[in-house]
Amino acid sequence: MTSSFEFQPYPARPTDADRDRALGMLREGAAQGMLSHDTFLRRMELVLTARRSDELAAVTADLRSDGRWADRVFGAVERMSRFTARLGRAWQAERLPKLLLPEPGPTPLRIGRDPANGLRLSHETVSRMHAELRLQGGLWVLRDLGSTNGTTVNGRRVTGTVAVQDGDLVTFGRMGFRLTARSAR
């Protein structure tokens, strides 16, 4: 004599991910004006207390998009928004001319408005004898020569001498350059 009975499993409780998806749909529905604030709060409470997945589905049934067309439109708008944000960042990125580090020699490279300098900069904020750049002990060293409008390296004013390297931002008065090593052209 065998008795047969059917085992009916209790439906699984919704996972945290299921609840998060439902809450996301509610937030999106509220943002699009499909739900009032009170309705949003009431449904949010239902999502948080739901015991079965079908209860979650009932709470968000009227918020489901009608399919692929809406998803494509929203996806295209999102991609365009990301593109314009990247374009804005690229537009604001610094565009500085390169200043090629000179060949090492016995005399430093003098920088300023004076025609006798190795690097002549014709700008009203650059002093006649503004700064000098030399290779010293394997390091490039920049020294301000008492200029009126100052010399900066990576935004910090140079007082005395400072070691510089490939990629540093150097300004003489209001003229800015990006230092570039000969091998990094």
Image: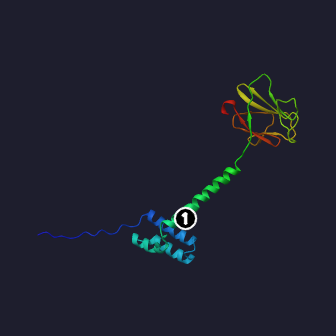
Q: Which residue is mark 1?
A: 73
Quarter of the figure that contains the N terminus: bottom left
Q: Callout 1: few (<14), some (14-19), or many (20+) C-alpha neighbours within 10 Å?
A: few
Residue pictured at 40% horizontal, 69% vertical: 53
Give the total of numbered labels: 1
In the displayed structure image, the side of residue 37 where residue 2 appears, left or right: left
Residue pictured at 72% horizontal, 44% vertical: 95
Residue 112 position, x and y percent, is 85, 34
Quarter of the figure that contains the C terminus: top right
Helix, strand or loop at mark 1: helix
Residue pictured at 45% horizontal, 72% vertical: 49
The image quarter containing residue 57 is bottom left
Residue 50 position, x and y percent, is 43, 71
The image quarter containing residue 124 is top right
Residue 130 position, x and y percent, is 85, 35
Seen from the viewer's position, the closer of residues 34 and 82 is: 82
In the displayed structure image, the side of residue 12 where residue 92 appears, left or right: right
The vertical placement of 166 against 23, above or below, is above
The vertical placement of 64 against 110, above or below, is below
In the displayed structure image, the side of residue 163 where residue 115 appears, left or right: right
Seen from the viewer's position, the closer of residues 64 and 60 is: 64
